[in-house]
Amino acid sequence: MKYQRDFLGELLGTFLLVLFGCGSVAVSVLFNSHTGLLQIGIIWGIGVSLAIYATRHLSCAHLNPAVTLAMVATKRMTVKKLPVYLMGQFLGAFCAGLLIYVLFNPSIVALESAQQIVRGTPESMSIAKMFGEYYQLPGSTAVVSMPLAIGAEIVGTFLLVLMIFSLTEGCNLGRPDNNLAPLFIGLTVTSVLCLIAPLTQAGLNPARDFGPRLVAWIFGWGAAAFPDQSGGFFFVYILAPVLGGLAAGLLFTWVLEPLMRKTESQCCEEELAERVSPSLN
């Protein structure tokens, strides 16, 4: 396989990201161990940072189709690698969801029995949310329509991808050291989660949503795994993150990057002038 390093990097990285993130949601749902949004957001952020550190020597550590498509659209990655990256990401997310099910299914069964929840019913979404996201959960105080959920996912993914570009592109003089960039990307994930999660659970990543959601569908949640018959799952958690990522990538490339390069050039000219000026005096 020509791009096996890229495939393995994206598979392993997305696996780790989803395992840490969805695992924290599972622990919260089943054991009330992480009761606050900030706690879960921090675990997600740490998981993202660790996944990037673990795999960026294999692939570009996108770990998210929305990021990969933005990179391809802005010609930062060849389109030939696109299928390899997407396959690795979706397979990694599915494998992580599968492991979470294996680890926690006995506890899931116990909770279903204790609360008399029948798997596959609307009430079972309160447990299925450890796999996929839902913008309409029974008992939730948030009032979220499909258009609002789509908008929230676009905004959240836009912020995430914009920060990824800003933190990793050399034209940004304010970016951190390359060794610190994964930490700041993780902090971005935590911040966006705290903003968007009350509305949609903050998918921001089509692979992170679809892979574990498919696991839930296979193991008995059925219609509860894909509850919106009008296509809400696809529009909110697949299409919206892709649109948000593309918008961020294009904005950075067409607007911010030229301005940053102009500023960089001006800074170099000013620095050169300062060096030359004393020698002339």
Image: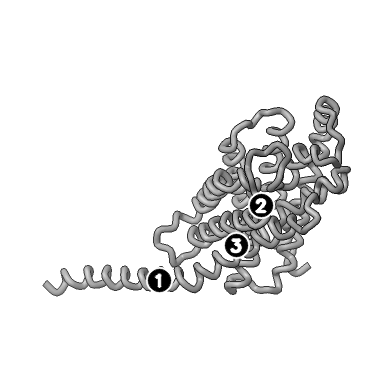
Mark 3 element type: helix
Relative image position of residue 278 (x, y in whole percent): 16, 69
Amino acid type indicated by mark 2: Ser
Q: Nearer the viewer, mark 3 or mark 1?
A: 3
Mark 1 element type: helix
Relative image position of residue 111 (x, y in whole percent): 80, 29
Residue 201 versus residue 154 in the image, above or below: above
Disc nearer the start of the sequence (3/2):
2
Disc nearer the start of the sequence (1/2):
2
Relative image position of residue 18 (x, y in whole percent): 70, 47
Residue 139 versus residue 52 in the image, above or below: above
Disc nearer the start of the sequence (3/1):
3
What residue sits right under mark 1 in the picture? 259
Outermost residue, left direction?
281
The image quadrant of residue 153 is bottom right
Q: Quadrant of the N terminus?
A: bottom right
What residue sits right under mark 3 in the picture? 244
Q: Is residue 63 visible?
A: no
Q: Residue at x 55, y 49 (%)?
A: 192
Instruction: Give the spatial CA distance, label 3 vs label 2.
Output: 18 Å
Q: Is residue 181 left or right of residue 5?
A: left
Q: Residue at x 72, y 55 (%)?
A: 207
Q: Residue at x 83, y 31 (%)?
A: 112
Mark 2 element type: loop
Identify the mark at residue 145; answer none if there is no mark.
Answer: 2
Amino acid type indicated by mark 1: Leu
